[in-house]
Image (spheres, grey):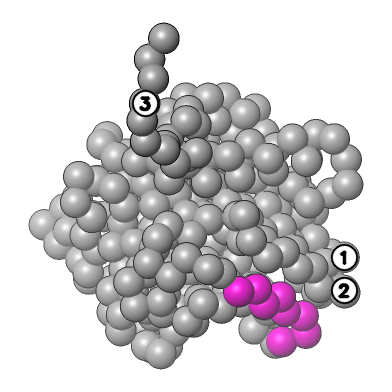
Amino acid sequence: MLRLDFDIHPAALIDRRPEYLAPMISGLDGIWITAAEPYVSFDENGLFEASSMVGGAVFQRVKPNFGNQQLAEQGSGIVFHAGQNCGLFAKFPKGLGQVVSCALRFTSASQNAKTLLTFNPTGQDNYVFLSQSGRELLLKDQQTTQECVVQHDAPYADIGVLLAITDERLSLQVVDGAFIQSKYGMDIDLRQSMEVFLGCRKNRGGLQKTLGEFVLKDFILLPDLDIFADMDRPCQIRHELERYLNSGSKYGI
């Protein structure tokens, strides 16, 4: 029997390979974006697009992103720079279903990632975004009809985030940390044509104050699923996502 005379962090005992999670995401018609080869493409201006390791989505750089993107060392994440539009986006012409859930893992040395993620429905006068300022994570809609705010305790380490958007509520959780739900939902139809943005809010210039600094390491999107629903299967899925995000895996983005 191997004996060690020092402690091992629990994350080191978790299966860090993405293979155990990928079949579950695929079975849910989800997508998993990764910065690892061969899932990213470059042109003469830099990073051009990121294809999903699971699912058929392709996130391309937005119009005002003129090659501002780069990869972190050893392909361990996509780097977003403060004040520069490094945004990526994908179109979902058929929408995302009645509800949607997401998992993200990121780090921000400045604790000021600002816009991390945006759901912007076509032809609707509202959108939902996730942002970070200091140790505060905020999930809200642009019209401020509903919002969720949680605190996180990992200013310089990876931060794992789970969220869900339904017509009844917003849900936001920091992995191994705070959890909150809004009292009501919002008047946004997720079933309509949708654009999903990483690192920005729209496919146009401006809004510089919403562009922060962070490294995105994982982005998982699960359409038509509320991982916070009080049923066995959603709970199981949420726990698997928590296990992966809490592992600090070097795989994925």
Gap between marks 1 and 2 measured at Cα: 5 Å
- Say whether disc 2 or disc 3 marks the residue closer to the N-terminus: 3
Mark 1 and mark 2 residues within 8 Å of each other at the beta carbon: yes
Instruction: From the top left corner, tell me how far across and down residue 140 is, in percent.
Output: 67, 77
Read off the residue under disc 1: 168
Q: Is residue 246 magenta?
A: no
Label 1 environment density (alpha carbons within 10 Å; few <14, some 14–19, many ≥20): some
User: Which quadrant, please, contains the N terminus?
Assistant: top left
Secondary structure under tag 2 reads: loop
Instruction: From the top left corner, tell me how far across and down residue 215 is, in percent.
Output: 34, 62
The overriding secondary structure of the stretch rendered in magenta is strand
Question: Based on the displayed image, in which of its 4 quarters is residue 37 positioned?
Answer: top left
Check residue 32 in the rendering and tell me which mark sits there, or answer none: none
In this picture, which residue range is highlighted in magenta? Answer: 144-151
Mark 2 and mark 3 residues within 8 Å of each other at the beta carbon: no
Q: Is residue 19 above or below residue 157?
A: above
Label 2 environment density (alpha carbons within 10 Å; few <14, some 14–19, many ≥20): few
Q: Nearer the viewer, residue 88 or 215?
A: 215
Read off the residue under disc 3: 4
Question: Based on the displayed image, in which of its 4 quarters is residue 88 positioned?
Answer: bottom left
Gap between marks 3 and 1 measured at Cα: 50 Å
Read off the residue under disc 2: 184
Instruction: From the top left corner, tell me how far across and down residue 193 is, in percent.
Output: 64, 59
Q: Is residue 147 magenta?
A: yes
> Could you tell whether 186 is left or right of 73 in the image?
right
- Residue located 61% across and 45% down the image: 242
